[in-house]
Amino acid sequence: MASVTYKNVYKRFGDVTVITDLNMEIADKEFVVFVGPSGCGKSTSLRMLAGLEEISEGDIMIGDRVVNDVPPKDRDIAMVFQSYALYPHMSVYDNMAFGLKLRKTPKAEIDRRVKEAADILGLGNLLDRKPKALSGGQRQRVAVGRAIVREPAVFLMDEPLSNLDAKLRVSARAEITKLHKRLGTTFIYVTHDQVEAMTMGDRIAVLADGILQQIDSPRTLYKRPNNIFVAGFIGSPSMNFFNATIVQEEGKMIVDTGDFRVEIPAEKQATFKDVVGKEVVFGMRPENIHVPQYAPPGIVAAPFDVTIEVVELLGHELNIFATSGKNSLVATVDTRLEANVGNKIGLVMDMGQMHIFDKNTEMAIR
Amino acid sequence: MKRQKWSGIIFVNGFLLLIVILWSIPTLGLLVSSFRVPFDIQTSGWWTVFPHREWQTVAVIENPRETLGVDPDTVMEIEGVFGTFEEFREGVASGDLQVTWIGNKRIGRVEVQEEVWTVNWDFTLQNYQTVIFGRDTEIQNPDGSSQTIPGQDMQQAFLNSLAVSIPSTVIPILIAAFAAYAFAWMKFPGRRWFFIMVVALLVVPLQIALVPILSDYNALGINGEFLSVWLAHTGFGLALATYLLYNYMSTLPRETLESAFIDGASHFTVFTKLVLPLSVPALASFAIFQFLWVWNDYLVALVFLGVDPSKKVLTQRLADLTGTFGNAWHLLTAGAFVTMILPMIVFIVLQRYFVRGLMAGSVKG
């Protein structure tokens, strides 16, 4: 049980800087998810914490101990790898007991902990099996079990669910969340899957190009993204972005994309008065675009017209890919809409959920 | 499509079968010959142990001029076969009979032969007995007493070969496994250059090193000792062993090793508890390579062990067999088989590793 701190951490491979000035404080017992596209440095950040990669600059602390030069085995951490990294020639029991044996834990204690972990994970009747006789889901649980028995201060997971099929992933997700509650240990979890990130994390750290974009609770990340990258990365389908200008006419403030104009609600006008007349990026999530007749009550609706290009009915939702002049957009609308390709229809945007970003810095204006 | 597949399978299997047969025939011949009596080996091929047709003399007619009343200067009829004298000298065949005139016109004899099915099944264990236990020679001393000189056998040579081969296999594997692990998984300055050196050593021919090593051994005073051959084979085998094991060990999944490091393992623990057990296929396949090579080696043993009879290895004894007894084919074949037994056992026992080891890294799983 310990907090984790990254302090001005850099990681360079030769001339390439893969982590730039990473600062993060992870509280004790917190579940933090590192998320980002491949190559964003999320795994490297985790591996530096595990001691598998050297730190080029800065400090990493576990609790209040700087662990830069502490070997992995002395960091009081346990890690679950994407490939599970089980020891193929050892039984499930020995796989879990390996770390404890190396630490000269008494036999009875090893036995107790392994049995307990096996109970938690439902591996009780598999303890004598070799990894190759296990299914993917079972292997994944053994990998988790191997980490649990160590009773580490920090639990590290590097895409542990990526090799599971979609259905298993959903149940495994819930299991890991439950496990976190039960163990009350700091969890750091790396994934490229935003659904995993949103559902599991107390807080989510979004990384891109080795730079921490934002670390916040899932709700904040979704509602108040710091910049265009976070706004586009979180949410599915991705947020729509339009190049636009903010204009002020007769006391109204209007976002003008050239193809359509939507009005900014009165209570938000103060926020954007500094960017009036400037070019900005206007962001609107697909789920905040509605068909007028099915729009939820109480929204600040701004109407505009589109031409439907592609229709995707997923059952519980209907995605329409449409164009409005030179702009294209995605809208997740009520499934009752009879949408046909080529139709021109009117939609409304919920302007209460609008986002405006600076065009140059890509930072949110709010 | 299906038809094509079938014909493909038949073609491939047929081709493989052909290769197997072609490669096994010499061994079979050697095996059969080793059980045949010396006279047979020198007069007929080993394949005559299989049923075959052979001319067998059924009747001999002495002095045919008198007994048969034939004139060799004209066309003759003997046993219903016609021919001139010249033709009968070569042998005239007609139907199942072959009639041959042996000798000159005046006092020859005629052999009538019939072609019959036969097998040459005159087998003996004497060859093996001589080869394995030696043949005692009794000589008469000038004073009339007789003396028995025990023959040279292969038992000592067999033991010597074991004494050379086993350490010469185990030592390089031990050293190479450590080296390969270090090259594959440890960071140290100059790792790359050291490894390039190892690879470069792969292509150095053994013969180049013989003389310098011999002079070093002389200086150290270990020339002619088993230790000298062990060291030589270790040195010559180490480059290939390191390279082979490195290739295998570097394909072990990185995450598994990292997981062990996090679990609290040191490099040594990872090596002994994880990498060694997982590298068994590669270790075994190199062990076969090295064992066969050392077992069959003649040159290194000859150069470093010398010709001390008590230290001769099998290959040397085998060479002696032909030397001591002239062209003693029967002994050579039996000796060759005695020599082959152990490598064959080693190969058959470890062959699944051999194939797996050669395939290492090429396929997943």
Image (spheres, grey):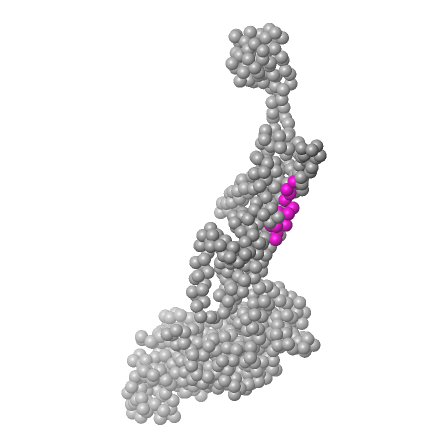
SS majority, magenta: helix
Residue at x 44%, y 73% (from the top left corner): A38
Residues A62 and A103: in front is A103
Left or right of B210? Residue A118 is right
Residue at x 41%, y 76% (from the top left corner): A12
Left or right of A366? Residue A137 is right
x%, y% of residue A252?
Answer: 32, 90
Q: Residue furthest right?
A: B145
- A283 shown above or below B342: below
- A233 shown above or below B217: below
x%, y% of residue A333?
Answer: 44, 77
* Quarter of image, res A22: bottom left
Q: Is residue B162 magenta?
A: yes
Q: Is residue B90 magenta?
A: no
* Quarter of image, res A344: bottom left
Write the start and end of the magenta stretch as one range. Answer: B151-163
Residue at x 67%, y 69% (from the top left corner): A125
Q: Residue furthest front?
A: B143
Is any part of residue B253 visible from this angle? yes
x%, y% of residue A259?
Answer: 31, 79
Locate the C terminus of chain B and report the quarter of the image it occupies: bottom right
